[in-house]
């Protein structure tokens, strides 16, 4: 009985070991699992990190940075040196205002892939938007040296041009004087070459906003954001600037246009622009162009970023033609990367009111009045007046010359 039990136990143990070997041993009939990304074989960990990074990108396109950060942290737990995850995490952290962490992550992405232009370009942009203009300029200039054939270079050159101009302007205006901003305004930045502003007689300024429906990246909320931006400047001006929206571009003093193509902007370094027609010191017409896409980002603009863009360009259209040297002001030289609701600063308000406290010279006021009453044909009217005056002067001169010649002509006596 005991022997039989021992044999049965041995048999059972043999069966168990056989089953274990069968389940655990590699099966010759099935190939081992392999992973590929962009045609290149990668490890299972790298493949999973790629999948999580793609998920994070999808979250960013949905304006869900919290979900994106969670995905990217998970990806880096699996693959700590994965450069794509570091780069996207840097962009996401910058969006939520963690700029120092973003800088560190960009550095990790650069170390992980020194030949990639993306992280270095984004780091330079982060320097720029946080007010470190000299660091940004140095980083962009290095990119030109290291990636001269990149299709990104035209945009980089535009940013270099913008930064050099801003740094020179700040230096010229004394921006590095510790007491310079104590007065709470940056009027010196925008009035050094003479003021430009709308005359009092032009108020309320008529504003026309074209529809952006059908444009790639356009959101119907942008229309109300732009209108609110005009109202915010109006309220800040203490009644010096007033607006009235109209339905026809022909009636407008300020016309606004949405675009989804950066080529329609004069410079790819900014997300919008304001073009002004001035006669003397008086602004007579303005045209604002606003891009609904960020050419420097793979992710859509948010309402907060669009508001900052609108406030900035409306400020330009009112005569704030220069820029502030401080990132906290709406009129800083570049749009911020941080997705945060912002409004005109105390320095923006003070600068606008100081600008409109300065009187326009009589000549500029007269020119602006002719422009309005001639429906935008002041130059033609003035040219016609000059021609008429010249014709009158010429006629008077001719008559005077003839009269003088007649007096000098000797009289001859006739003989009988």
Image (spheres, helix red, strand yellow):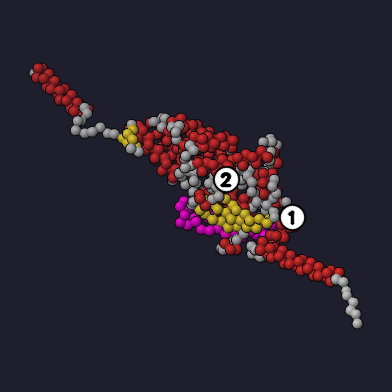
Instruction: Please say whether residue 321 is one of the residues in the magenta stretch.
Output: no
* Relative depth, front residue between 199 and 96: 199
Which quarter of the image is occupied by the N terminus? top left
Which structural element holds mark 1? loop
Q: Is residue 343 left or right of residue 220?
A: right
Q: Which residues are magenta?
A: 198-224
Residue 219 magenta-highlighted: yes
Position of 379 with respect to 267 (left or right) is right
Residue at figure coordinates x 63%, y 43% from the top left: 324
Across and down, in percent, residue 160 comes to 56, 40
Separation (CA) of disc 2 from disc 1: 35 Å
Residue 248: % across, % down: 56, 63
Q: Quadrant of residue 40?
A: top left
- Foreground: 387 or 226? 387
Please rate how many residues cluster around mark 2, counting C-alpha atoms within 10 Å: few if below 14, some from 14 to 19, many from 20.
Answer: some
Residue 228, numbered circle:
none
Q: Are marks 2 and 1 in contact (CB under 8 Å)?
A: no
Instruction: Please name the residue shown 19% across and 33% down the image.
Output: 29
Q: Is residue 243 visible?
A: no
Q: Nearer the viewer, mark 2 or mark 1?
A: 1
- Return the mark for residue 361: 1
Q: Is residue 297 above or below residue 288?
A: above
List the residue tagged with mark 2: 342
Q: Is residue 333 left or right of residue 400?
A: left
């Amino acid at each position: 009985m005991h022997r039989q039990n021992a044999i049965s136990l041995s048999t059972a143990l043999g069966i168990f070991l056989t089953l274990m070997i069968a389940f655990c041993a590699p099966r010759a009939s099935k190939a081992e699992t392999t992973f590929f990304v962009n045609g290149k074989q990668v490890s299972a960990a790298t493949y999973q990190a790629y999948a999580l990074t793609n998920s994070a990108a999808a979250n960013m396109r949905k304006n869900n940075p919290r979900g994106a950060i969670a995905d990217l942290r998970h990806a880096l737990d699996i693959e700590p040196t994965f450069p794509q995850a570091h780069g996207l995490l840097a962009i996401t952290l910058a969006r939520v205002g963690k700029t120092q962490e973003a800088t560190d992550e960009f550095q990790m992405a650069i170390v992980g892939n020194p030949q990639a232009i993306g992280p270095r370009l984004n780091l330079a942009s982060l320097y720029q938007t946080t007010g470190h203009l000299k660091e940004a300029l140095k980083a962009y200039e290095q990119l030109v040296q290291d990636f001269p054939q990149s299709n990104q270079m035209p945009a980089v050159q535009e940013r270099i041009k913008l930064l050099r101009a801003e740094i020179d302007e700040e230096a010229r205006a004394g921006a590095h004087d510790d007491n310079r901003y104590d007065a709470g305004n940056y009027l010196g930045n925008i009035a050094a070459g003479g003021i430009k502003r709308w005359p009092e007689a032009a108020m309320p300024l008529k504003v026309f906003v074209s529809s952006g429906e059908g444009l790639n990246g356009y959101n119907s909320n942008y229309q109300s954001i732009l209108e609110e931006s005009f109202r915010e400047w109006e309220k800040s001006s203490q009644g010096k600037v007033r607006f009235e929206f109209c339905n026809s571009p022909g009636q407008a003093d300020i016309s606004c246009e949405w675009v989804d193509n950066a080529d329609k902007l004069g410079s790819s370094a900014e997300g919008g622009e304001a073009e002004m027609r001035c006669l003397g010191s008086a602004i007579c017409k303005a045209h604002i162009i606003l891009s609904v896409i960020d050419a420097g980002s793979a992710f859509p603009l948010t309402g907060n970023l669009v508001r900052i863009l609108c406030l900035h360009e409306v400020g330009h259209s009112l005569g704030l033609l220069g820029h502030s040297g401080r990132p906290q002001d709406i009129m800083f030289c570049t749009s911020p990367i941080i997705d945060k609701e912002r409004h005109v600063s105390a320095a923006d308000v003070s600068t606008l009111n100081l600008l409109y406290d300065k009187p326009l010279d009589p000549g500029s006021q007269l020119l602006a009045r002719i422009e309005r009453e001639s429906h935008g044909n002041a130059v033609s009217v003035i040219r016609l007046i000059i021609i008429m005056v010249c014709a009158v002067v010429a006629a008077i001169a001719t008559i005077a010359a003839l009269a003088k010649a007649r007096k000098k002509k000797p009289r001859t006596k006739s003989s009988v």
